[in-house]
Image (cartoon, coloured by chain):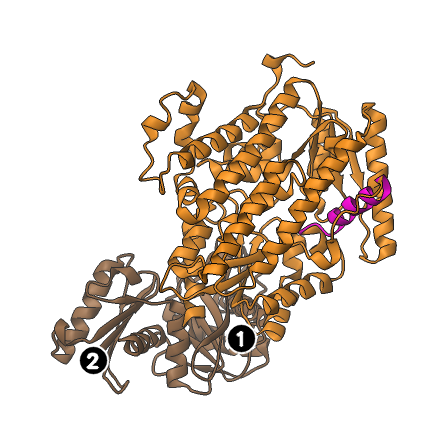
Amino acid sequence: MRETKEIPVEWFKRLRTACSVIEAGIKTGAKSLAELDIPALLKDADDYTKKVVDMLQPDTVDAALRPKNRNVSLAFVQAYGEYLDFVLDGIQKGKKLVYHYFECIPQVLLSLDMIPVCVETISVLIAALYKDGCEEEIDTLEAEGFPAHLCSGQKGFLGAYLLNEIPTPDYFLKPSVPCDPSNLLFQYLAKLTGSPYIIFDAPYYTNERAFNYYKEEIDDAYQKLIKMSGNRLDEDKLKEYVAFTNKQLEYIYKIQEIRKNRPCPDPAFHRPMDFALYTIFGFSEKVVDYFRIVYEEAKERVEKGIGVVPEGKEEIRTLWTWAFEGYDLSIYHWMEEEHGATYLTCGLTILPEEVVGFVDDHDMDSILAGLARLTFHYPMSRQVTSFADVWINDFTRIARSHKADCAIFAGHMACKHGWALNKLLSDAIREEAGIPTLRFEMDLADKRFTPPAEVKKTLSEFFETIRH
Amino acid sequence: MYIGCDIGTGYTKGILMDNEGVIKASCIIPTVANPRDASKTIIKELLNGAGLKESEIKGCGSTGWGRSYVPMQHRELSLINSIAKGVSFVHSSCRTVIDVGAQHSMVILVDEKGQVLEFRQNDRCAAGSGRFIEVISEALRVPLEEVSSLVLNAKERVNVTAQCAVFAESEVIAHVNDGKPVDAILAGIIDALGRSLVAIAKRLSVVEDIFVSGGMAKNAALIKVMQEHLQKSLHVAEPDPRLVGAIGAALLVKEVI
């Protein structure tokens, strides 16, 4: 077992504290930050909590407390908080730690008694929940000689390692797609830490032959992990995670379907939380609960004939064709309240039921195949690994089925693969769905690139042209 | 009577429009980094010129960078909507607007009612805007108003590759040191700006008739270069390409009041 005092876990602790503070805040019944009695909330808090609470992003906390967001936000911080407890506890117990890219599903790693940590999610959540986000970490990495136009999702995390805020992992795991810089940044971290880096190859095509190749690659990656670690796959545990996965998928498909309703019954603020919980797919009943609550609240609104847009505001149904900005999540609440702009889906959360389906749990082969298929069609991987048709067909279909009023290409400046396709996609959306696309540049986790006020200004101008 | 104000980073533009949509007066003054004072002056000049009191104005629409600073009851409007509306009102055949202001440039596709179908803006700071020309003309010590005629009469054109105004200035200094004529350097700069604007236009499938608005539309050399690169005819918005945002703002406020 590692010695407790020597293990740096600052980032995980910081996120766990944010989850605890938001959970406690929601439980007070306060419906906005202004209503929250912070001194009372912190009365019995530990020194660490008191130290970091002022660093929390006030607008994001405020949005989480709002009536239409609070139940889902509570479910999120409880689910993600439980996961962070598992990470912190597992690190102290000396479990094998695996840092992975966000398109690696964690169920098998969990069943190998390992701790899966998605690099990009941690950076984005730090950026989303704390005022200074991962800026110091990004600057630290750039001081090593890396340019500004690499992904902050990885730069933040690598910088955290350099600043001794996260521990050395036992392994790295990543698919070979969709972006080259992440492959190489993972290599850099692997070189720094001396930990093995396992990469599984993803084919260019999306047919069954391609999938079979991909599945073999994933199986091979797991075998390498088993061989190197000496850990054994707990099949009963895997079945348990798969059961959670299937329940989660069931709700995700229902949520995607229910957003077809006009007015949209599902708040925009939920989408980044969906993304974060996709990266701990099947982790626990609490993760399932999150998606169940999202669905049940949306269903209740549909039954009552109400949406999430304030009364008297005309709805603008937005389709986010690529990423979202992750450094100020309150923007999604703001655009709904200020402009009546709802959020149908995005390139980081779309999961088409007809191609992903459910994980067949009748034997180990079918389970591993089902999980591989989920990864194969994981958001972003699916859209930019193969021919442009995949992305274009997915989003033009949703634009029509969900009656989108406009599309928004929030282009993370590091996603060259996304930018390379944006013209084809926006042209197709205009031709086939008759709606315009706004495109703007931003950085996923670094607000200095396009500050929140600039994002709001850009969105406001665009929404005014739609409304007019 | 209605007032339309477009408070840009370079100039503040205002128009007075009657109930039938006829422009009764217009005014253009430098903003000089003070949108509050500039809009105050514009309103005062428009009212005094027409012998009107503020209470006689049915509505004031404001747009542009400093739109929130107008010192009278006003409605803030999108610059994109205002430009589209303003150009389409004067030129009903317009389907594309290329607007080049001091600090921005944008290409807007509009329908037959002047409603925005889609738009794209420059995403490289000053490189695609009038400020780009200002920076370079200052560096070359050429008055801004002489740039167009110098370029139109230039015998040669140097190649300017920089996409950033700051880097372009360094490139210009290098050309000066190489003994290149000033008009050839300016021709290269105008060509670089034209190319970057056409690149924005090509991101959308531009449809004719195409009108150019904003302060840079008065630069005939730029219009010529853009026509060459776009291989389409361009028309300059009337009555003054700088006024279209203000005209649109007046029309939009007239529609809602």
Viewer-closest of A360 and B51: A360
Residue B72 location, x and y as percent? 19, 65
Please identify the quadrant where the C terminus of chain A is shown: bottom left
Boundaries of the magenta span: A364-379
Residue drawn at x 48%, y 39% is A74
Q: Is residue B26 left or right of residue A64?
A: left
Residue ID for mark 2: B1
**Mark 2 and 1 residues: CB-CB less than 8 Å, in contact?**
no
Q: Nearer the viewer, mark 2 or mark 1?
A: 2
In this structure image, what is the colour of chain B?
brown
Would residue A19 be seen by someone viewing this image from the given angle? yes
Residue A125 location, x and y as percent? 54, 38
Viewer-closest of A434 and B86: A434
Please identify the quadrant where the N terminus of chain A is shown: top right
- Per the rendering, the mark at residue A47 is none
Chain drawn in orange: A
